[in-house]
Amino acid sequence: MFSKKAQVVDILRCMQRDDLAIKALEENIQSLSKSLGSRNDRIFRKYIPIISSLWYYYVTTGNNLQTLGEEYSNILRFTSTNGIPSRMTQLIWLILHIGGESVVDRLISYMESQVKSSGELREEARKSLLNLFSIWNIIKCDLLTIHKAIFYLNGTYYTFAHRLSGIQYVILRDWLEDKSFHNSFKILGIITIIYSAFNISKKVWANRFNQQIETESLLSTIRGATSDKICVLCNEKRKNPSSTPCGHVFCWECIYESLSYTHKCPLCREEVIPSRVIFLQNFI
């Protein structure tokens, strides 16, 4: 029935309109939450964005209705088989769109903890799996950027939720098709892919370099070659000694440079948030 695929501009306009509608809904819910008291408001406030998006998309796409953005842009959701998505498909898309990233992060974190605590894996296999998890954590944002760049090139799937559920967009009226900036988006997509690929290679190399430093530092510690006053990252006397929450001390510049690539302690691989690194004054 509809054969014209929606253009990138049409889909972006749709998403911007939906975001504005969800933002307005958030403000209304926030006004309502204030009436619950300051304590309940603080607890409830962090869930408002999720509730707003869930409510908005459930009322519209969950019931096979157009969102305000889709109606504004004159586009309609279709599956890859050129049919209207079933309600189940729409609900799957909604779950993936709202909580997919969080579920994946929790799953990866659980698998990583299982690998660390497993007594059945060989040490080589354990290191390889932990290295894969570490690489995933540092490049996942770049993978999302590459996915968005692919969307700029072909205009097919706006998010991973669209791709996994097979939902695309078609234009309802051919004469309203907007091909403005079509070539510009293609150029932007190519540049973004090149930049993201370079960024991924740089992060992977830095992660490997940090692992080499970690191995060398542990070996030096075992052999007793390092002094208590030596930074294991630069192998020199510590300057502006700073401690991670797990208790290891490094140079201020060394630990922050290391954390810019991966938020893990170079020695014990515990999770470290840069803002929690403590500068040790009068530390001898």
Image: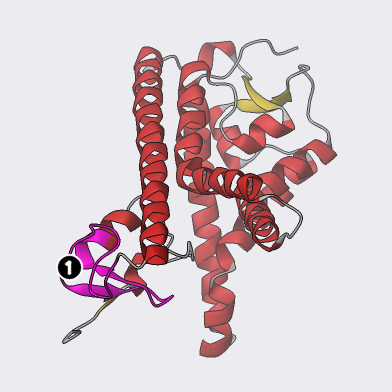
Q: Tell me residue 267's x, y (percent).
A: 42, 63
Indicate the quadrant where residue 221 lies. Answer: bottom left
Residue pointed to by mark 1: 237
Indicate the quadrant where residue 84 lies. Answer: top right
Q: Residue furthest front?
A: 223
Task: Please name the residue shown 72% across and 50% down the image.
Answer: 58
Q: Secondary structure at mark 1?
A: loop
Q: Tell me residue 236's x, y (percent).
A: 18, 62
Which amino acid does the dot numbered 1 rest on?
A: Lys
Q: Height in image: 252 above or below 2?
A: below
The verdict on residue 11 being magenta is no
**Quadrant where the image shows the C terminus:** bottom left
Region of the chain picked out in magenta, as a range: 226-254
Q: Height in image: 86 above or below 277?
A: above
Task: Please name the residue shown 76% across and 39% down the image.
Answer: 90
Task: Please name the residue shown 55% across and 53% down the image.
Answer: 22
Task: Please name the residue shown 61% across and 26% down the image.
Answer: 75
Q: Quick one: label 1, few (<14), some, or many (20+) residues within 10 Å?
A: some
Q: Tell me residue 282's x, y (percent).
A: 16, 87
Q: Nearer the viewer, residue 91 or 101?
A: 101
Q: Tell me residue 251's x, y (percent).
A: 22, 67
Main structural element of the magenta stretch: helix, strand or loop?
A: loop
**Quadrant where the image shows the N terminus:** top right
